[in-house]
Image: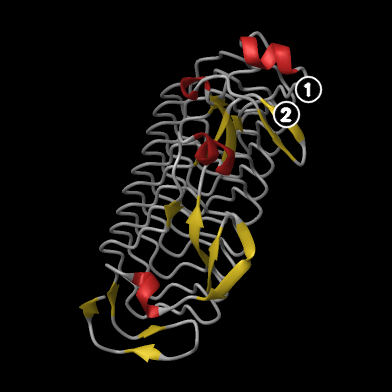
């Protein structure tokens, strides 16, 4: 049993390079703390606050991050049009943890909030991501302070940001029914992953390896950070990108293609939707199998 820091206020603490094997940080406030290069094997962070916390290059194999808050996006929504138009509305800037090049093999990230977080070059082999959130509503003042209406009111100009997994190893990961839309999985290893019922609308899967993965009943198609920004001419819809994506021996049975603006547009994923992918022994949505290794 490691050191017990459960429930403590540890904002800004420097744990970099330390041996914290089996340490308990459950419920602690670790905002702005530094764990860079530390050894966190088997550590527990359940329900901890990890805003702007740095875990880069740390070894957190078999650790538990269930229910953590590792990302916070746009927090303030106003119904005052004058405030929004003048740019004087109060809002909380985005805060995200950093898991770049972190070893999280065998870790549990269930129910955690990781919107827009970087897991680039990390090792998440066999990790459990089920119930985790990877999207963040972000401030988008770079697009101007236009206001717009939608079913929930008037919002400050906003953007939705997905987590980044570029060049990470997620082989054998468990992510059933997880929303991966708008995330960046370019050149990521997802071989043998359990991804049934997951959502990949607008995700970048270029160069990703899904060999032997289960994508049964998954959703692909056109996603966008904000259809309202598209209406303003400052955004554009983004389709799931399959350029060089390896789908050899991947099961796509029952998977669908959908446009983010119209849930009723759902249809079975078709061969043409996989343009640029590398296939072979690939089971398509309708149950047919593409056996020849080639690029669609």
Residue 83 image point, x, y percent: 70, 12
Residue with the mark numbered 2: 154
Residue 101 figure quarter:
top left
- Dot 2: what SS? strand
Q: Residues within 10 Å of mark 2 (few under 14, many from 20)?
A: some
Using the rendered image of the protein, determine whether residue 90 is visible from the camera's viewpoint. Answer: no
Residue 38 image point, x, y percent: 44, 29
In the rendered image, the quadrant that contains the C terminus is bottom left
User: Which residue reaches farthest left?
Assistant: 294
Total marks placed: 2
Q: CA distance from mark 2 to mark 1?
A: 6 Å
Q: Is residue 193 left or right of residue 122?
A: right
* CB atoms of marks 2 and 1 within 8 Å: yes
Is 46 drawn above or below residue 38 in the view shown?
below
Choose between 283 and 4: the one closer to the eye. 283
In the rendered image, the quadrant that contains the N terminus is top right
Res. 184 mark: none
Residue 281 figure quarter:
bottom left
Q: Is residue 43 left or right of residue 191?
A: right
Q: Residues within 10 Å of mark 1 (few under 14, many from 20)?
A: some
Is 170 drawn above or below residue 85 in the view shown?
below
Q: Which residue is at a point 39% across and 36% down the rendered structure image?
A: 100
Q: Which residue is at a point 52% across and 25% down the rendered structure image?
A: 140
Choose between 237 and 118: the one closer to the eye. 237
């Amino acid at each position: 049993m490691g050191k017990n820091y459960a429930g403590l206020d540890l904002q800004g603490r420097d744990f970099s390079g330390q041996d914290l094997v089996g340490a308990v940080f459950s419920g602690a406030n670790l905002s702005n703390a530094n764990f860079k290069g530390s050894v966190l094997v088997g550590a527990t962070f359940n329900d901890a606050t990890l805003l702007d916390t740095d875990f880069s290059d740390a070894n957190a194999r078999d650790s538990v991050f269930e229910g953590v808050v590792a990302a916070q996006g746009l927090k303030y929504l106003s119904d005052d049009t004058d405030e929004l138009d003048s740019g004087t509305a109060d809002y909380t800037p985005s805060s995200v943890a950093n898991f770049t090049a972190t070893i999280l093999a065998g870790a549990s990230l269930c129910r955690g909030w990781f919107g827009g977080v970087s897991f680039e070059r990390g090792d998440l082999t066999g990790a459990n991501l089920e119930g985790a959130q990877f999207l963040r509503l972000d401030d988008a003042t770079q697009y101007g302070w236009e206001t717009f209406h939608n079913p929930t009111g008037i919002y400050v100009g906003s953007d939705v940001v997905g987590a980044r997994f570029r060049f990470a190893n997620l082989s054998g990961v468990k992510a059933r029914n997880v929303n991966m839309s708008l995330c960046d999985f370019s050149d990521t290893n997802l071989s043998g992953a359990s991804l049934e019922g997951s959502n990949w609308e607008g995700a970048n899967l270029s160069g990703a390896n899904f060999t032997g993965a289960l994508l049964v009943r998954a959703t692909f198609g056109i996603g966008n950070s904000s259809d309202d920004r598209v209406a303003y001419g400052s955004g554009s819809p983004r389709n799931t990108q399959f350029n060089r994506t390896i789908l050899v021996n991947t099961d796509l049975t029952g998977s669908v293609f959908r446009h983010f603006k119209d849930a009723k547009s759902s249809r079975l994923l078709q061969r043409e939707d996989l343009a640029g992918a590398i296939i072979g022994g690939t089971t398509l949505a309708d149950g047919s199998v593409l056996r020849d290794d080639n690029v669609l």
